[in-house]
Image (tube, helix red, strand yellow):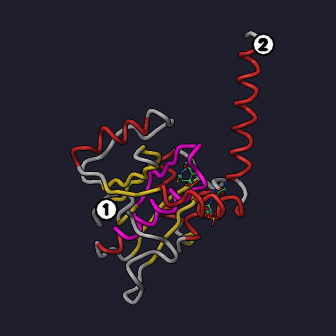
């Protein structure tokens, strides 16, 4: 690599480390949200646009390139560009594994993290399940996924101590998972605590 090339990649490396440091600071995330959060909007995808938008996002991630008929997808946009996605769906109560309402596939493109997109996507999934009459919404995540664990507990999810469900998740994913649950009570408002709605 020539001098200019290695200087460019050095700069890019420094910039990535700086972005990561900002995203890892709760104070910087708050500041970022207050300055740039209004650029984030969240919208439910129609069936027609689903495959195209999700695969456009999926090109930038390791997994989850397929959309599933019947699942509901929300996408987060920054200045019209899709930057994040989540799905929410119901498995029939007589399903062999994982019955009930689940949310999954939450992903925000790395450079857009820390701006509130993940929280707004998860809030949209919570609202959808609640408005559909679900008694609770479930998700799984890796035990070491601190960001997801913090985000989901921020929106009212608690770790579910259900060995059978955990074993089913392990069977589906091949690795140990933490299952988290957001329970809906009849009295609570339709929006998740502190979370703005899709816009
Ligand atoms: C998890 C993920 C979706 C969060 O998206 P995001 O847009 O960066 O999150 P937000 O800006 O909305 O942050 C909301 C909350 O998430 C948690 N969070 C976000 N980034 C965090 C970080 N770097 N460290 C710790 N907690 C973090 C915090 O609770 C934060 O609230 P706070 O800022 O008030 O502390 C994103 O990091 C991601 O796509 N990760 C890779 C894919 C993944 O792990 N998906 C979950 C699979 S189950």
Q: Identify the residue at horizontal 49%, vertical 71% (top origin).
A: 195
Q: Earlier in the sequence, mark 2 or mark 1?
A: 2
Q: Name the image quarter holding the C terminus.
A: bottom left
> Does 116 lie within the magenta span?
yes
Q: Is mark 1 within 8 Å of ligand 1?
A: no
Horizontally, is 131 left or right of 78 in the view? left
Query: Which residue was labeled with disc 2?
Result: 3
Asked if marks 2 and 1 touch (Cβ < 8 Å), the reply is no
- What percent of the width, then of the height, locates residue 85? 43, 50
Q: Nearer the viewer, residue 39 or 49?
A: 39
Q: Is mark 2 within 8 Å of ligand 1?
A: no
Magenta-tinted stretch = 103-128
Q: Identify the residue at horizontal 58%, vertical 69% (top origin).
A: 153
Horizontally, is 35 left or right of 135 in the view? right
Residue 83 higher or lower than 149, as above or below? above
Q: Name the image quarter holding the N terminus.
A: top right
- How far is the residue under mark 2 from the one under mark 1? 55 Å
Q: Nearer the viewer, mark 2 or mark 1?
A: 2
- What percent of the width, then of the height, locates residue 143? 63, 56
Residue 114 higher or lower than 133, as above or below? above
* Quadrant position of residue 132: bottom left
How packed is label 2: few (under 14 Cα within 10 Å), some, or many (20 or more)?
few
Q: Residue furthest top?
A: 2
Query: Which residue was labeled with disc 1?
Result: 90
- What percent of the width, then of the height, locates residue 106? 47, 52
Q: Nearer the viewer, residue 43 or 162?
A: 43
């Amino acid at each position: 690599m020539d001098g200019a090339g290695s200087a460019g990649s050095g700069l890019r490396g420094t910039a990535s480390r700086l972005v990561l440091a900002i995203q890892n600071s709760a104070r910087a995330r708050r500041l970022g949200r207050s300055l740039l959060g209004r650029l984030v909007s969240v919208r439910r995808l129609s069936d027609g646009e689903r495959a195209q938008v999700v695969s456009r996002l999926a090109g930038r991630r390791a997994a989850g390139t397929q959309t599933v008929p019947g699942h509901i997808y929300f996408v987060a946009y920054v200045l019209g560009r899709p930057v994040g996605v989540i799905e929410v769906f119901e498995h029939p109560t007589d399903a062999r594994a994982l019955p009930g309402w689940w949310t999954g596939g939450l992903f925000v493109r790395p450079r857009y993290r820390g701006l509130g997109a993940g929280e707004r996507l998860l809030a949209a999934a919570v609202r959808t399940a609640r408005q559909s009459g679900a008694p609770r919404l479930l998700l799984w995540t890796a035990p070491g996924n601190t960001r997801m664990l913090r985000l989901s507990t921020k929106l009212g999810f608690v770790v579910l101590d259900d060995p059978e469900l955990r074993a089913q998740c392990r069977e589906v994913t091949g690795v140990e998972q933490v299952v988290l649950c957001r329970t809906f009570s009849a009295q609570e408002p339709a929006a998740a605590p502190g979370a703005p709605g899709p816009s």
